[in-house]
Amino acid sequence: MTTSIFYKRYRMQIDLASLPDSAWEENSLQSTHSPIAWLTWHPRLVGLHARAKWESFRNEMDGNVFPCLADHEGCKQLMRDITSKSNFVPEATWLAVCQPGSPEETVMGTIQGLQTSPALGAIQNIGVVPAWRGRGIGRELIRRSLQGFRDAGCRIVTLEVTVHNLAAIRLYQTMGFVYAETVFKYGVVPMP
């Protein structure tokens, strides 16, 4: 049995021209096991992006807001849908992995972007797998995505975040994102 609910989300935005030069400098992160590989978009990575998305959101509130995020096949379809759009921004789409190319290859995080107008970009999903949170991976994924949006000609970039995700909101604010508006998304949750 399920019940319907509206989730309160913030739309946040950042003006890329307002960022200091230091915002574009690459972070030198290393995992505790091996170096992190930052993979720019390539169609052969759709499955890894989907796995990173699913591992990041399947047990989170966003899995209720967007049920496809709680389903591995749903994440694959979402990745195919995003990347097949005419306004998909490959330069703003990144994947973080540990031990790339090995049988123990581990997805760490993912981010995708769309260009909603000539000067406006929109981060679609930023997800960091729970075991890898708190290590700067989300910050570096966002930095790389923002650089990709800038290279694509965007001046403003937006994203949405559920208001209960305080850690993500703090991260976005420290990077220069500001509140733009409140939006509500319809979702379904199981009843006890």
Image: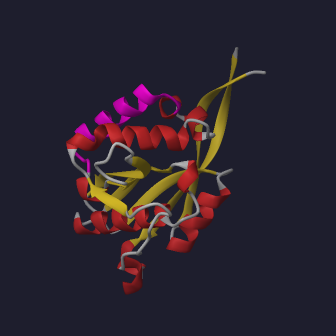
Q: Position of residue 72 (x, y in %)?
A: 44, 29
- Residue 10 lies, with reference to residue 5, above or below; the image says below
Main secondary-structure element of the magenta-colored stretch: helix
Residue 190 seen = yes
- Examine the structure image and report whether residue 80 is included in the region drawn in magenta: yes
- In screen coordinates, is 64 left or right of 88? right
Q: How is the image coloured?
A: secondary structure
Front residue of 165 and 99: 99
- Residue 145 lies, with reference to residue 110, above or below; the image says below
Front residue of 173 and 130: 130
Q: Residue at x 41, y 75 (%)?
A: 27
Q: Furthest-right residue in view? A: 192
Q: Position of residue 144 (x, y in %)?
A: 35, 66
- Examine the structure image and report whether residue 116 is included in the region drawn in magenta: no
Q: Position of residue 31 (x, y in %)?
A: 47, 63
Magenta stretch, residue numbers: 70-88
